Image: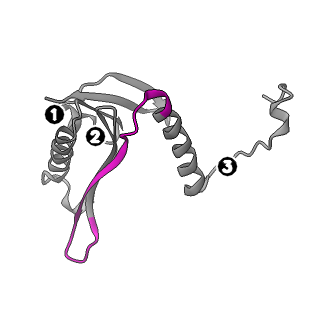
């Protein structure tokens, strides 16, 4: 890595727990690069939150819309309300919001201990799988075409 004289001019810093600010800066640089090369500046985040009467989050889903595609980043439902259809309704609501905004497909990643079967029931297909997370978990890549 440091055999290149050009690279030796820079400080190499390994951060085991990088700051949110540094990670956001990295994401912004990559998004700027992508916008420049894809000739598209229409990317933005989208989220739906379910809150109780004290404004505490009970569930939520978020993603990134760009290039007629929605990438779901996070879906979380509080333990006390799981199994009541909240997650399903959040996914459906985000899919509908994506369609209204011109999306034609959705992608997501999920682990074997999370919810691959949940997403399959909602029409997401397994595209790729990586074994070996923690020696016994699997990571699934799942797209879905929209109408």
Label placed on residue 135: none
Where is residue 69? Give x, y as percent.
Answer: 30, 33
Task: Return the residue nearer the eye: 10 or 111.
Answer: 10
Nearer to us: label 3 or label 2? 3
Where is residue 46? Give x, y as percent.
Answer: 30, 50
Measured Cα–Cα span from mark 1 to mark 2: 10 Å
Check whether the beta carbons of the residues at disc 3 and disc 1 lie within 8 A of each other: no
Q: Quadrant of the C terminus?
A: top left
Measured Cα–Cα span from mark 3 to mark 1: 39 Å
- Quarter holding residue 146: top left
- Quarter holding residue 2: top right
Task: Return the residue nearer the eye: 34 or 74.
Answer: 34
**Residue position for label 2:** 115
* Few, some or many residues within 10 Å of mark 2 (<14, 14–19, 20+): few
Q: Earlier in the sequence, mark 3 or mark 2?
A: 3
Which residue is drawn at the image coordinates 19% and 60% (left, top)? 81
The tally of labels here is: 3
Furthest residue to the top? Answer: 127
Q: Read off the magenta span.
A: 36-57
Q: What colour scheme was applied to this rendering of the protein? A: one colour
Please tell me whether residue 5 is drawn above or below residue 65 in the rendered image.
above
Please say whether residue 55 is one of the residues in the magenta stretch: yes
Q: Secondary structure at mark 1?
A: helix
**Residue position for label 1:** 121
Label placed on residue 15: 3
Q: Is residue 111 visible?
A: no
Check whether the beta carbons of the residues at disc 3 and disc 2 lie within 8 A of each other: no
Q: Left or right? Give the position of 74 relative to 95.
A: right
Q: Earlier in the sequence, mark 3 or mark 1?
A: 3
Where is residue 9? Give x, y as percent.
Answer: 85, 38
Please say whether residue 11 is one of the residues in the magenta stretch: no
Which residue is drawn at the image coordinates 27% and 56% (left, top)? 60
């Amino acid at each position: 890595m440091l055999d290149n004289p050009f690279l030796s001019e820079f400080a190499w810093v390994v951060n085991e727990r990088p700051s949110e600010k540094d990670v956001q800066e990295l994401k912004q640089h990559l998004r700027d690069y992508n916008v420049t090369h894809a000739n598209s500046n229409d990317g933005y985040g989208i989220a739906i939150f379910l809150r109780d009467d004290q404004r505490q989050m009970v569930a939520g889903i978020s993603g990134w819309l760009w290039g007629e595609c929605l990438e779901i980043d996070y879906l979380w439902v509080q333990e006390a309300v799981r199994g009541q259809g909240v997650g399903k309704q959040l996914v459906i609501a985000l899919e509908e919001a994506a369609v209204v905004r011109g999306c034609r497909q959705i992608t997501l990643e999920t682990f074997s201990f999370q919810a691959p079967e949940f997403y399959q029931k909602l029409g997401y297909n397994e595209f790729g799988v990586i074994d070996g997370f923690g020696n016994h978990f699997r990571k699934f890549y799942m797209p879905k075409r929209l109408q």
